[in-house]
Image (cartoon, rainbow, N blue to C red):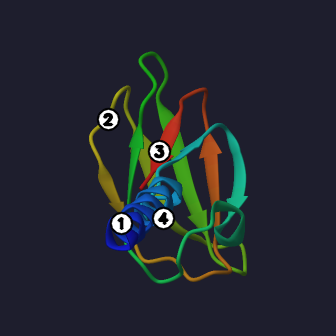
Amino acid sequence: MKKSTAIFLTVLFLSVGMIKMSPLAQANNLKEGFYKMNDLNLEPNKEYDIQNLSPSSAVYILVFDKNNVVQQSLRLQVKSGKYKLSPLPENYTIAIVGDGDVSIS
């Protein structure tokens, strides 16, 4: 009796813990605006994929360094495929221009 209760409680606690876990590569869906790396909870110096999910609007992506110099520029067509962003230090800023819905994963 005690063994079955202990096993049941162990399985119960493990299953509840698994439900609360969030995925490591959580997608961020973004609209037009300026975003800092810290605001997006992205790890610095890691490659990320970016794509336009919008069915009707193209989007421009600009990546600025700490001195506001453009380091990367992309134009994402409607429902674009995934494109690689270069590894971004934590003090970089991403600007999204357009009515699209951008996903970073």
Local SS, label 4 = helix
The answer to whether 105 appears left or right of 28 in the picture is left
The mark tally for this picture is 4
Q: Are marks 4 and 2 in contact (CB under 8 Å)?
A: no
CA distance separating discs 1 and 3: 51 Å
Nearer mark to the viewer, of 4 and 2: 4
Q: Quadrant of residue 37?
A: bottom right
The answer to whether 35 appears left or right of 101 in the picture is right
Looking at marks 1 and 3 on the same chain, the residue that comes earlier in the sequence is marked by 1
Q: Which mark is residue 103?
A: 3
Query: What residue is pinned by disc 2?
Result: 80
Looking at marks 4 and 1 on the same chain, the residue that comes earlier in the sequence is marked by 1
In the depicted structure, whether residue 10 falls above or below residue 16:
below
Residue lying farthest top?
Answer: 56
Q: Residues within 10 Å of mark 4 (few under 14, many from 20)?
A: few
Query: Which of the two residues, 71 or 91, is positioned nearer the viewer here?
Result: 91
Local SS, label 3 = strand
The answer to whether 14 appears left or right of 37 in the picture is left
Query: What residue is pinned by disc 1?
Result: 1
CA distance separating discs 4 and 2: 42 Å
**Looking at the picture, how far across and down is residue 40, in whole percent?**
64, 61
Amino acid marked by disc 3: Ser
| Residue in the picture at 64% in, 53% down | 95
In the depicted structure, whether residue 51 falls above or below residue 19:
above
Looking at marks 3 and 4 on the same chain, the residue that comes earlier in the sequence is marked by 4
Q: Are marks 1 and 3 in contact (CB under 8 Å)?
A: no
Amino acid marked by disc 2: Ser
Amino acid marked by disc 4: Phe
**Looking at the picture, how far across and down is residue 43, in whole percent?**
53, 77
Amino acid marked by disc 1: Met
Query: What residue is pinned by disc 4?
Result: 13
